[in-house]
Image (tube, coloured by chain):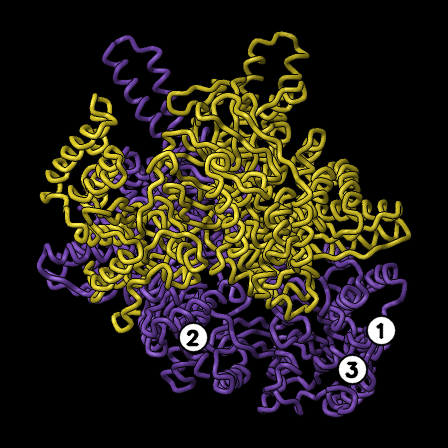
Chain colours: A yellow, B purple
Amino acid sequence: MSGDTTSRWVIGLADADGQDVGLLGGKGAGLASMARAGFPVPPGFVITTDTCRAYYARDKLFPEGLWTETLAAVEVIERETQKTLGGSSDPLLFSVRSGAAVSMPGMMDTVLNLGLNPASVEALSKLTNNPYFAWETYRRFVQMFGEVVFGAPADRLASATARQQASDGALTVSGEQQLVERLEKIILGHARRPLPHDPEEQLQLAISAVFDSWMNRRAIDYRRLNGIPNDIYTAVTVQTMVFGNAGEDSGTGVAFTRDPTTGEQHMYGEYLPNAQGEDVVAGIRTPLSLDHMADRMSAAHGQLVEIAGRLETHYRDMQDIEFTVERGRLWMLQTRAGKRSARSSVRIAVEMAEAGLISRQEAVTRVTPDRLNELLHRVVKPSPEDVVLASGLAASPGGAAGTVVFDADEAQQLAEEGHRVVMVRRETSPEDFHGLVAAEAIVTSRGGVTSHAAVVARGMGKCCVVGCEAIEVDYAQQLFTVGSHVISKGDWVTVDGSTGEVFLGEVDTVEPELDDHYARLMTWADEFRTLRVRANADTPEDATAARAMGAEGIGLCRTEHMFFVEGRIEAMRAMIMAPNAVSRAEALADLEPHQVADFEGIFEAMDGLPVTIRLLDPPLHEFLPRPDETLLRITNLKLRLRDATDLNDIDQLLEEINVLENVLDRIERLSESNPMLGHRGCRLGIAYPEITEMQARAIFTAALHCAERGISVIPEVMIPLVAFTSEFDSQAAIVRDAATRVFEEHGISLDYTVGTMIELPRAALIADEIAASAEFFSFGTNDLTQSTVGLSRDDAGRFLPGYIQRGLITADPFQTLDRVGVGQLVEIGVERGRRARPDLKLGVCGEHAGDADSIEFFHQTGLDYVSCSPFRVPVARLAAAHAAIATED
Amino acid sequence: MSGDTTSRWVIGLADADGQDVGLLGGKGAGLASMARAGFPVPPGFVITTDTCRAYYARDKLFPEGLWTETLAAVEVIERETQKTLGGSSDPLLFSVRSGAAVSMPGMMDTVLNLGLNPASVEALSKLTNNPYFAWETYRRFVQMFGEVVFGAPADRLASATARQQASDGALTVSGEQQLVERLEKIILGHARRPLPHDPEEQLQLAISAVFDSWMNRRAIDYRRLNGIPNDIYTAVTVQTMVFGNAGEDSGTGVAFTRDPTTGEQHMYGEYLPNAQGEDVVAGIRTPLSLDHMADRMSAAHGQLVEIAGRLETHYRDMQDIEFTVERGRLWMLQTRAGKRSARSSVRIAVEMAEAGLISRQEAVTRVTPDRLNELLHRVVKPSPEDVVLASGLAASPGGAAGTVVFDADEAQQLAEEGHRVVMVRRETSPEDFHGLVAAEAIVTSRGGVTSHAAVVARGMGKCCVVGCEAIEVDYAQQLFTVGSHVISKGDWVTVDGSTGEVFLGEVDTVEPELDDHYARLMTWADEFRTLRVRANADTPEDATAARAMGAEGIGLCRTEHMFFVEGRIEAMRAMIMAPNAVSRAEALADLEPHQVADFEGIFEAMDGLPVTIRLLDPPLHEFLPRPDETLLRITNLKLRLRDATDLNDIDQLLEEINVLENVLDRIERLSESNPMLGHRGCRLGIAYPEITEMQARAIFTAALHCAERGISVIPEVMIPLVAFTSEFDSQAAIVRDAATRVFEEHGISLDYTVGTMIELPRAALIADEIAASAEFFSFGTNDLTQSTVGLSRDDAGRFLPGYIQRGLITADPFQTLDRVGVGQLVEIGVERGRRARPDLKLGVCGEHAGDADSIEFFHQTGLDYVSCSPFRVPVARLAAAHAAIATED
């Protein structure tokens, strides 16, 4: 790739292999393809990415042979076009553009109209019989060259131009001439050298400038953010300028071969007569539709339509085309895969597959799983006037507007009265559950994308923004401030959970719609994937929603969420406050019928599909009221006591105070330094076996009730947070005993399995031991990430973003599975578990189960299923298909 | 081992192989050895442990052949003794005793004087010419047989005896006769069958009863608690009774071949004339010294001394001997290794090695490492009247008394005034550090053996009891209650950190002393061990103490402890409160000279030895005041503000309130849900690189100061809580840059290394990656246990004891390394780390570094050193020697 094969530095567009994007860059490869296919491409050549690499290897010197080859290539073009670089009769002008293998829009430099100087501008003037066009073009060149090549301050150049244009000299030849003089003076003052008039010197400097722009701050940052390697380098495309601004028979435009919004199969684009491409991009003039072009220059339009069709067939994808018409002649300036909406992306993929242009596999891989969110959730459509109050982490997609409320009870009440509310809190806790249910959207000022608010919101498909640090919530005054804005209870805000933005007031949102193309694509995806997709669902409603989204079972039913409902939390608290096992058993007996009813509803919704029910997991203090609120209530009661005179009142108040003080005492006793590592999961069931027994009874009672009604029930009972095999064995024994007893009572039985979460490193390491008695594993990758990386998901929000910003890690390990660390433990767990029990069923129920990159890993690791939030199910189905197709390749 | 070799059920003592403890049980083997060696052992036989196993396998039926063999063995003894079982002239009486391979004192059953009935008791009466002796012996038999074999209620039998003895009939023949009648009636009433008078039936039932007692509740519990397997079973020793109570020429006693308290080489024991062994054990009569026996029955005494010497030579260990003299004739009843004090254990081992009786290796393994604590720490010597207030976890050994204090400042003040104080708290935090330094002992009502209080106390060699759940601390009233006791500030308590007991008032304690035998034993231990032993020490004083204990360097110097000292904590807080990097740098500059001075002192104390300094580790909020205290101070200031009238006062108060409110705000912002998994360790240095830089500068400045004074400095800089290689690289770069700059400033340089803690599962899993740039690893097994097992050491105290009690785990994983889980990660870390860097230095600095069982594992895993609290260093040295010797075998 170096000096020995000299032809590698410079390749003429017509001679280049358009497939070799790595060598030619995206732009060069596109042009070369078009040139080879015989499309009208302005003559030009590509200086390859290898050349750029060699340039940096030589400490920014041209590699040997480059300049000679460049001059030779120029000569070829001069011959072909019959024009001469810097010529005084018919001058050849060049565009000099960057172009890496991966698109980095606007990050690197470009020089247009290269070749102009006092001599050639006169020639151009005469030739076009349009002195203003010639001098304006020259002025554009001077401004651009000065800025890009000599690094002259852009603002000074721009303001000089603006001043001139504002004065009388605007849009006149002499005005442009004066401006050129002024700009050249600024450039000289800055660069301490005059702008070269020798076109070859111009070219040499422009090529260097484009190379140099590969390593400018902006480009480096962009690559880091987008995971683009530094060592792919940029190519430089040098191409004959064509002029869309050469008169009324000229113009320029962009066209999509299909509608990028709807995906409909017709050419869609914009056209600007008598203009250069920059004018379209800059938005100075309002472009016309392509119909207008068809009317005014039907030949060129016809040719464009024909070429567009051929390009699409050639590239097997919708194309985004730039073109120019110079004095009636069509020139193709660029073609590339067009960006499109999610809806369009689905439709184009499906229609191309049905037309036989691409395979169904390819159609499936054409749609990025995460983009399905745009189809599944309401989308915020802000207008330019809408004010973004704050930006946080996009925790759960969708858009919604409502009045601000800070309290869960109030949220519920307002929602019942028909109001749309947005719940805003510093953070949320399980106590706020009913408020989250009632709210249209949730905003928290703290927490990361796996904080309580985020997890619950995703579970409900409700839009949510978390970690919105700029927001200062003041509960006492029932308002929040952000910068100079003060938003009080009752004020309207709009939340965009897909971007993380919170808007002031009510902003437009658009309803999602799922069309037939979506249905077809998902059917294909389901055919290709081997990984099953289940949902995490805690209520019959969630289960129904999940099934509608295509869930093939429930992989995680969190029984504790059932306890937070009004009327049950009281029984739960009585259970926790129970002074002994007897009163605990009584409180549990109150809860049992509720659990049975919930389980019945869930089993019914999942008729024929497996349902994994996790036994009680969170630390008990989560079910008690907040300590500060309890303290406040006690204080208030004491104030009332001070003023009370009636003896009955006094007795009553004393009694209430006593009860609350007991609660406070229990809260204090249950409080933990690190609850995540504390008394939770199966550790609860071991301390209070009666809880496990009650839950198991409820599961099997509900299952038998359903079975008696002809519903096919496949219960899987899951023991959480197992670290020691003995823990699993002891809990599993209680579950199996309860099953036996319930079956005996009913006189019938059914199949069920007992398994465990693998969510601690120790459990993964002893997976073989555990699998000796556990019938399935579900990897709880949230907790496994916390413990493996030693990172609290509730607290990491404060410093993890800094890690990503500094490049210490590439992704939030709570969003995208850390394959190296956590993934290694998953692999160990899978391997050892299967070794001990070859038919062990393996799934994952952490947040990662809805993340495309992580799903690829889970597929490769050989899991049987992933289980994610209901509204992530389609994303997971598609991602699983991608993973399966990628493995086949 | 069953019916085919019939001789396996029953073996005569004279024919048995005394080495086969597994088959004969400890007691049987000891007797057989003595019998074989020709010592006077009453004739008898052993029913083997195999027999007991077969008995249980046959659902508690005698295995085939057992009874025939037993009768044959009885016949042999009848021939030898010329006595007859149940005989009416010279009756043969038996003792029937249990005896497993492992001693389980008092857990199983025994029947004595078997063979007596109305006929043989008359014969015995005539033969001894002592009817009272005969009838008393018969009554003892009836009482024991009824209780042990027929399960008659012991209290009813005992109270019948007591009533009778209290009445006139006591100590008369007729009294004993009436008592036998009454006891037989009680037994009949309970068992619904009469006590058998047939001696063979008695024997058969007694053998069954001893077998059955293997599975009684008490024995099962004892085995579980002591880790003794259930399937080793018990043997039954049937032996001719000899009577120390046969007159004034008879007696019974126990003797140790050396002094069990001091280890001095002379026989030591007790003797009771005209008595049975039970009387010695029961403590009814005060025994005499063996000198008394030498005077009264010099022949028997001389024989005993001679036998004792031979036994010690035979068993190569100090023996605990039971003997009886029956009418002038010495009989040996039992020999076993004698229990002894730690001091005695050291002296005996050393003297036996020096006498050539055992090897030096054996001498070293004879002393249990943990028992060195008795030599190293003050010991509490309670008298029977002393009241144990509460028992908690023995967190740090030693004993101390003092007046109770609840506040660190007060503890410090009282200590400065010369008072001895015991600090009592619910739990402690780094803020209490100066109080812990000042206190004689520490008691907490919460927390486990690796809680803050426990770790700090062990570091200082200060006695400490934690998790004393019975204690209810009331800070407001400055008292604690436990049961009905109320202990107020200023009351005396005594703390035994070796047993976990807290006594009311001042209890005697004894000063430890280290003698020459200890020094010799430790020298040998150091010769055998290959694992190096360092200490965790944070101050020059700790370092000096550690070196005196034999530490070969510092494996963990926690720099944060330096910040808690008065005068520094203010600068630390200023650093945390700093609004920007500039004022943070200023506050750090204030801290730097203190760090330099501390490091100099430590380097000096460790001249020539390596010192591992860990960079700042705890979350920053630990350095701020407690939120509740701050709130209280604000409230008080506000109250004063209300009453203030002077404008200057008002300004001043407002300013103070403002400062404290800022502190409170920062506390709230820094507070974390799970601080253990939060913003700490190297995560701090990444957010605030200036902290790392300041610490590194201080380390290298101090090192050069020392080097200039001729001190040999070996600094090892340790980055804590690394999860990602990028974290290590980024921090190591700051450290290395600082070193280069400090070296340049001083114009000299020295060798140093930069390494990391491996304390997260992820770090162990990517050890190869980390070792590419880290020069040493120190396994932080406290945190590694927390994260691997998902267990907070501060919270686990609430439920881990229940786990151990229920047999779910055998040991607290924070005390004894969990080899299966955490150990596996250590092995992975060692293997991958060494693969990437063969000369990687590997150590461990968690609490496990002072635990003997864990040290064995660390030796096997191939670590270079362990680093423990200074006062555990001797324990670790000895344990390391044990591990090395065990590996050689």
- Is circle 3 on the same chain as circle 1? yes
Looking at the image, tell me whether mark 2 or mark 1 is earlier in sequence order: 1
User: The N terminus of chain B lies in which quarter of the figure?
Assistant: bottom right
Looking at the image, tell me whether mark 3 or mark 1 is earlier in sequence order: 3
Location of residue B733 in the rendering, given as x and y in whole percent from the top left corner? 26, 56
Give me the C-alpha separation between circle 3 and circle 1. Answer: 12 Å
Give the answer, above or below, for where A867 lies relative to B29.
above
Location of residue B77 in the rendering, given as x and y in whole percent from the top left corner? 74, 88
Give the answer, above or below, for where A655 lies relative to A379.
above
Location of residue B196 in the rendering, given as x and y in whole percent from the top left corner? 86, 72
Residues packed near mark 1 inside 10 Å, few (<14), some (14 to 19) or many (20 plus): few
User: Which amino acid type corresponds to the residue marked 2 in the rendered image?
Assistant: His
Place residue A435 in its image quadrant. Answer: top right
Q: Which mark is residue B882?
A: 2
Which residue position holds label 3? B91
Give the answer, above or below, for where A573 lies relative to B816.
above
Which residue position holds label 1? B118
Q: Chain of mark 2?
A: B
User: Toward the viewer: A448 or B329?
Assistant: A448
User: Which amino acid type corresponds to the residue marked 1 in the rendered image?
Assistant: Pro
Give the answer, above or below, for where B33 lies relative to B748.
below
Say which element carries label 2.
helix
Residue B868 visible, this orientation: no
User: Which amino acid type corresponds to the residue marked 3 in the rendered image?
Assistant: Pro
Say which element carries label 1.
helix
Q: Chain of mark 3?
A: B
Residue B218 visible, this orientation: yes
Place residue A660 in its image quadrant. Answer: top right
